[in-house]
Amino acid sequence: MQLYSLDTAVVRRYLDSPLLLGAEAADLLQYLGLADGTPIFLDDQTMMPVEPFCSWGRSMSYADLAEGTMRDYGHIMLRFGTHQAGRERDVLSATEADLVAYKKLRTQEQKTPVGSSAWSKESSVLDQFFTFALEQGHLQRRPMRVAARGRNALSPRTRRGMDIRHLSLEQYRYFRDVGLGGQNPNSTPNPSFRGSSPHRDRAGADLAVCSGMRWQEWATVLLPELGLGRGAYGDGDDADFKVQACAKYGKERGVFVPEQAKRSVETYCLLERPDFTAAAARSLERRHRDLFVVSRIEVETGRVHGALDGEQRVFLMKAMPPRLRRITVWEGEFGLEALAVFLCRGGLMPGADSWKRYRHAAWRRMVASQTAATPRLPAKRWRWHDLRHTYALQLLTYLEQRMDGDEPDPVARRRRHRSYLSGHIRYNPLLIVSRRLGHSSPETTYAYLEYTDDLLHEFDAAFAGWLGDPEGEATYAQIAARAFHVESSPAGVS
């Protein structure tokens, strides 16, 4: 069995058959409502669709799952199918013994066993597939028994909470300046640094730690959303905009980028970004038919007008998914240039693997430069998502301190917290942070409460000097002031 993923653009441009033209095939896929990323399973010998796998993939497309999610789910089912083929069985004839053996292989016996969180995702996909096969009549019964408390052969052995990891001020500046920026620990230039874009990587980290955006949100941000370049939303010192298509589950929320974070991005745009755009202008011009070429941006409505696949299209900027943002260009100083803020050598935004590579290289530099005087590093290297956790904890601690005032008694503080948890939802720090992070439920944000007391003693230094000069303004205080008045912000979340 072989796995493919649907890509309408590739079909339209490159399919050349005497029976069906690419444009006709693309129109047919659109008529059937199949989204890009839909997994297609074909037989190794006949190259014909394999059921019920293709029907299951179509059901995910109709459920409006994200393109990347469908690809991941398809690979999980292909991996299980390969395992079953090795046992001379197919997926539909799987027994509980097959599932137990597969679970042990993935979590214990293979060269690099997967962790509980990865297996939890994999087991959920297998469970969903067998549920679909049962509902569609391909199975008479499920292959595994349900034991006490709903557990079965696929259930993870352990239940893990959120893996919340945050950075102190010293750790963050070491990560940003030494790891990403290529400096020495004493802030002097490192002659051995061979990174090509320290300002870009530092700006990405600053944007993440002071906005709380997830990686896919800040890495795909466009110039007009930050108030930069032509067609910007505004030229203020800070930026307010909404994320939706790039947000988790497509949940819309407002994002506030403080002045110092925006200045960090402006520095990168001034010093490094022009080199990327100038070098890539000619190649982008040759590829213009494959790109979304913007002709006009409506500042007031956030609509983007341009040509895509030879047709005039209009998109809401917040509703543009990452894949569309990556191919969005406009006419710049050197010719066609990407509308995305962060670029790589090809002139378009870096992908997940590229940002992972930047982070891993930064970690190696941090470890190599570590001395007794540098901040202590954790056992596991930092993730980009740790900057979001840092944002949440720092802001939550600051807001709680604002509510507590000078109250030194921890018992009295807890009593006040219980009071405003029930009576002052609008100004409750936990709920403010929950809205800012875009959590579907405040219950998710509750996990951060376990860590806030660890930061209270650092209050005086927690918000000064995170960005820019150490003597700069209290950036997190600026964020907190905006958060307390979120209802008056055009990007506020009610």
Image (tube, grey):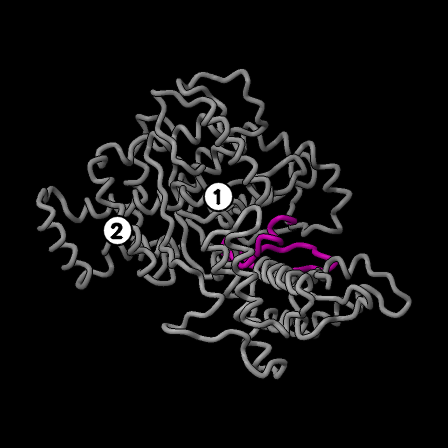
Amino acid type for the residue under numbered disc 1: Gly
Q: Quadrant of residue 3?
A: bottom right
Query: Is residue 399 at all visible to an observer of this figure?
Result: yes
Q: What is the x, y in percent for residue 249?
A: 48, 62
Which residue is rendered at x = 63% and y = 81% of the image?
138
Residue 491 to residue 354: above or below: below
- Say which mark, if any, is on residue 102: none
Provide the secondary structure element on which disc 1 rests.
Answer: loop
**Quadrant in the picture for residue 444:** bottom left
Residue 145: within the magenta? no
Is residue 299 rendered to the left or right of residue 466? right
**Towards the viewer: 310 or 34:** 34
Q: Is residue 322 above or below residue 187?
A: below
The mark nearer the N terminus, 2 or 1, is 1
Q: Residue placed at 21% from the left, 44% from the top?
A: 453
Q: Nearer the viewer, residue 452 or 19?
A: 452
Q: Magenta stretch? A: 299-327
Q: Residues within 10 Å of mark 1 (few under 14, many from 20)?
A: many
Q: Where's residue 152, x and y in %? A: 45, 70
- Is 317 one of the magenta-colored residues? yes
- Kind of residue at badge 2: Leu
Dot 2: few (<14), some (14–19), or many (≥20) neighbours within 10 Å?
A: few
Which residue, given by chain and number where applicable, does mark 2 sit on?
449
Label 2, label 1: how many angstroms apart (C-alpha)? Answer: 34 Å
Q: Is residue 338 left or right of residue 26?
A: left
Residue at 33% across, 33% down = 169
For label 1, the residue is 227
The answer to which of 273 and 217 lies nearer the viewer is 217
Task: Pick the quarter of the image with the N terminus.
Answer: bottom right
